[in-house]
Image (cartoon, coloured by chain):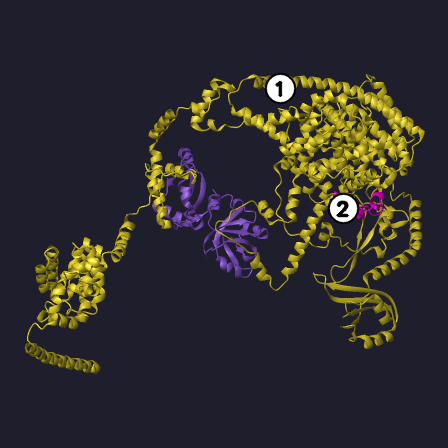
Amino acid sequence: MRPLTDEETKTMFEKLSKYIGENIKILVDRPDGSYCFRLHNDRVYYMSEKILKLATHISRDKLVSVGTCFGKFTKTIKFRLHITALDFLAPYAKFKVWVKPGAEQSFLYGNHVLKSGLGRITENTMQYQGVVVYSMTDVPLGFGVAAKTTQECRRVDPMSIVVFHQADVGEFIRNEDTLT
Amino acid sequence: MKRLYIGGLSHTITQKDLKDRFGKFGDVEDVELRTRRDDEGVPYKTFSYININISDADLKKCLTVLNKSKWKGGTLQIETAKESFLDRLAEERQTAAEQQLQQPAAEDKRQKMLDSLSKAGVENFTMKAAVPGTEVPGHEDWVVSKFGRVLPVLQLKCQKGSRSRTLKYDPSKYSHNIRKLDRSTADQPSTDQPTPVSQLTWEVQGGDDDISKKRRGEFPPYEPPRRKKSRADAVNSQHAEGSARSKQTVDSVVPTETPQFTNGHGPPALHRPAPSRGPPLTLGDIDSDDEIRRMVSVQTTSHDALQQEEDEDKLEVVGLDFLVTSGRARRQQKGGPDDEEEEDCDSADTDELLASRKPPPPPPSQERQTLPAAGSINIADKKRKTKTKKKSKAEEDDSTDAEEDVASMKPSCTQQRGKSGKPSSQNQSKKMKVLPVVRPSSSSSESDSDEEDDDEEEELESADYSSDSDYEAMFSNVTRLEISLTDLQRLAEESQDASAEQDTKLTAGTAERPTPKKGTTPEEILASIMGEDSSEDEQQKKKKKKKKKRKAVESTPLPAFMGSRALNEKSGTEGRQKVEEEEEEEEGGEVKKLKLDHRATGSKISRQKHTETETSSESSEEEEEEEKEQEKKVKVVKNMTKKVETDSSSSSDEEEEKMKVNQSDRTAAASSSSSSSSAEEDEDEQEIISAKDAVKAAPPPDPHSESSSSSEEEEEKEEEKKQAHPRVLLGAKEEEERQRKANMRRLAAVQQRQKETEEHKKLIQGALANLDAPAAGAGKHIVFGSDEDEDADELQTTSEVTTPKKTLLQDSQSEAAGDEDDATKEKVRAKPSGPQLFGGSEDEEDADEEKDGSRFDVRPEFEGRSGHKLMELQSRFGRDERFRMDSRFLDEDEDKEEESEKKNIGTEEEEALEEERKKSLSILQSVLGGSQQTSSSKTAGKTKTFRDVSALHYDPSREEHAAFETKTDETKKESKSARRKKREEAQKLPEVSKEIYYDVSGDMKAVFGQTKEDDVAVEDEKENWDQEEEEKEEEGGKEEQPTLQSSPLSADPGAEKEEASGFKFSFFGDDTETGSGETEYKIESIQAAKVSWQQDPRFRDSSSDEDEDEQEQQEEEEEQSNAAAKTTDEETPKKTEIFFFHPEDSRLTEGPRLFFQSSNLEEQKEQWEERRTELRQEYRKKHKDARRKLKSSLKS
């Protein structure tokens, strides 16, 4: 477990900023204590200082997970967000998409959000903007990337993809073994 | 007979039209007209099938004539159709029946066979003591199989391969467990008459209610699941089963299609038109209707071609600042009936609903008011004591302590009486009555408690009672409703299914039935009113019946069978009601279900008993009643033996006696029953109301529960309605029995009451002992502005304010308003469902609770580190109110020191973290591209603290507030110059011109020379100016530069002052260019001035200069001492001319000279001519050059 290098931090922040923009600052600079990102097994964990200190007592090979896993660095040093980061993305998300109750399940099984399932969308969403997907009851379901701008969404046919699926809470069950 | 399909009919066609039309060709037997409609009900296709007796020839004719003919706006299309499937079915059945007729022959054959077999020693296809495998003598195909069974040897055809062969199947080798086919059962389907064909088809009724809609395949739009109240959840977890049942019952209440369920038997209850439902029920229906309508509209629209557009419309686009709210809230925002529904559905709101829905009291109940609350007076003492504990007790229903329950019950009883005596209470009860939907009043809470109860005996008793009461209730109604036995059976069965446990209990217990009371005349009612106690007792009984379990809990160590009265008395109706309400709130529909179950079980039990005693009497209700009575008598006797009669002094006893008298007076023995029934009904209604509320939240109805509940409810309703109606008088026998019973009950009740009082006293003593200490302490101390007490007082007052009725009633010492109080109380604050530790009197309770609540609050001053210290300080003094520590006792300095120490301790790790954070923030900056202030976490924390903008004051000593200061420096500068300009323009123009005047000169050098001579005062400046001029001249080599220069300078005088050289230079560049354009002209004039007009400023005309001059003049006026003055020297003179002359104006002296010739005319002429030639030459030369240039340019 080590702090992120500048390069890594940058990659990660760039990714995060797609979803929460400048709100990353709130994650880094929290009023309720100091929190930090740590890299462990190519995964980035977000934890409080307290937990960090506790975790130092555990050897690296024994440590499975600490804090909240935000995502992992691929072998090509790209950062990939995990669904576990949803808790921190959802409150700060700049762009949101709400899916209709009928489309919830489809999304939760890993499918993209189609226009027919789109219940509501934040205005001025740009194409390929990271969005957090909510159910109509405002339960965050996951996140993805807007495939169409808000304006396009109005016009496209019902079966076209509006949001590309990236992660959904269904993964907690589907990928239970790999989510740390 | 043929069946024809006729298509292309107009929508307005009728069967008669068709009959007439086709009647010409044959005998039309049946016309089946069908119309297809689209979603909006608009017919788009109409066709028909007709059965017609027609010959082939006629058919042909018919087809040729009518087919494709136009008729009433449609083109007929006639085809022969297949026979209707129903007809075919009927035919098939007929043939089958015919076949059966031939069976007797086969029967004979078989009989013969059997006979022969029996001859061979086979009995019933078994041959004893036969070795398996032996053939039956005389029957080659029959073999003795295992266990001596005689079985036929089968020849099975095997079609495998090309040729078919037969296999012999010897059952003796294979079969071990061949079953004998019972012929009767096997033949059943064929012999039994199947349902007639005409009844095979049906139509789904086109009701508007939920279920029928769903049957038709119309489903309401999706609605996100409602969030259940946490309380309800808890309840559910506790009694998952019960809740499920309750839900079912709840749904059953909704008047959907109970008649269908009860179909064949046709219980009388169903015959009655559905009574007008109370608001709660109808509300649900309405909502569903609305939903359906909406859904339908959505469906229809969805089929439109504009679907896509609609989709677009549906797509919501939300602003960035869209706030995520709970789904429910949003739904509410939408408004409409849904919202109301939701609100109504909250189980926790039952009390409110109750209160809000109380209809005005019905007239018949007024009689009650007249009744003196004799019982209430006697009980007043008890009430008082019990009052304090009522609440707690009610809440503790679940607790198994029988004694406590009893005690609590007592007060409740008294309360009820008070109620009956007082109008307010009456109103309530009446209101309850008014509510349309009557539900079993059994308190679910009681039932729950029963279940929990360890005492089996008690349970049994309670069960008995309940059964009795149920039965009574049922049969009291029966006289009017005439419930058939089958109905009862059905109910019982249902109940059995629902509650197996209860059934077992009930069966075990002796089923005692109160004598059924038929018909209540108004007189009877009166009598019942007079005998309040008795009626109450009966009510209680009924309640008990319904709330069997509850009572069991309440009923302490009573012997097996005490009159229902004892039970009744034990359980205070009021307390029960309270409990019921509360519990119902908590448990929702669960209670209901239980009630229903109880009822059903009760009825069932009674039935069972009947069957036991008189198998033959099952059909007749009266017989059953008699049986009950008999049983009761027996029980009463037992009770008598068991119980010792004690004091008759209790009011209840007296009242009971009265009752008896009344009863005897009246021929109708059922008066008590009637009154009781009425009372019951009241209570029932109350319960029902609460149940209703609970019901709303419940899921779809269970058929069983539905039927039972509905029938019962209806019965009750009817009873209510027809209390006044005359009823059949019971026999004298029954009267006697009843009286005896009543007496028994009374005695039991007296005993019970004594016990209760004792227990009460004990309880109260204990409670008071606990309560006194703190209360006294609080009262005696002198309090120095302690906030707490005031708060408490305020709270009390508020509570009182919220429940004004309550207080009033209390003043009058009547607890009649108990119910209302409860309701109001509950409104005021949501009571915790669990038992409360600090239960006191109602009023005190409120305050106490508030206090208690505040007591456990974490006080803000004890929070945090400093708070901890303070807490320690305080702990030294214990909880003494006088030594309360608050923040003033804290040493701020200490804290600060500590903090600083802490900071000092700050480990390297933290620093590292800090650095890391900073780094990451900087990276973040780079990523986001924006400039973000990196702030350490601490400062960030500070900055995030809330600041009231309105309270913000500017503090000059604080650096941060420098931001609030407005910096005016720059603006001042600019404004200064601008202002100055304006000012200059406005003022001193004349003075300026004066100075300038001196400067006027054509040639710079000459002019300077002159001016020096003329005016000494300006000399210094001029010198400066000269120097500058000279420099310029050297640089540019042009004479006009000064003038040119002056104009730009004038434009920016301020700049000129401060950085003259720089500005000049820059302007120079610009000027040179412009100047070069005008060079020729200027040169000329200047030359002229040099040569001849040296001293004449006027000659130095430059028409273009005039504008500039004005500006210059202004400037110069201002800055007389400045260099600006010098710039204007040449041009200013003209202006001065324009404006005015000074008395000592040099021009006045010089001017006249201009009019004289300074030199000779000839000289001038010569000069001029010379010049002229030069000029001409020059001009020509230039002209040539220009031409050349043109040419060259053209050429190129």
Badge 2 amino acid: Pro
Which quadrant of the figure has residue B45? bottom right
> Quick check: B795 left or right of B178?
left
- Give how far across and how far down residue B882 sits, in percent: 50, 19
- Looking at the rendering, which quadrant does residue B856 occupy? top right
Residue at the image point whose x is 79% and y is 76% from the top: B69
User: Is B54 placed left or right of B705 in the picture?
Assistant: right
Q: Residue at x 75, y 22 (%)?
A: B379
* Above or below for B284 versus B632: below
User: Quick one: quadrant of the N terminus of chain B?
Assistant: bottom right
Specify whether residue B75 is painted magenta: no
Please name the residue that numbered disc 1 is placed on: B771
| Whether residue B466 is situated above or below residue B480 in the rendered picture | above
The alpha-carbon separation of the residues under discs 2 and 1 comes to: 51 Å
Q: Secondary structure at mark 2?
A: loop
Q: Is residue B258 magenta?
A: yes
Chain A colour as displayed: purple
Tag 2 and tag 1 share a subunit: yes
The residue under label 2 is: B255
Which residue is found at the position 86% from the left and 27% from the top? B632
User: Which subunit holds the residue at mark 1?
Assistant: B
For the residue pair B1086 and B557, the one nearer the viewer reads as B1086
- Where does the magenta region start and end? B252-275
Q: Which quadrant: the C terminus of chain B?
A: bottom left
Chain with yellow colouring:
B
- Label 1 neighbourhood size at 10 Å, few (<14), some (14-19), many (20+)? some
As drawn, B228 above or below B92: above
On the question of residue A70 being in view, the answer is yes
Q: Residues within 10 Å of mark 2 (few under 14, many from 20)?
A: some
Amino acid under disc 1: Leu
Q: Which mark is residue B1?
A: none
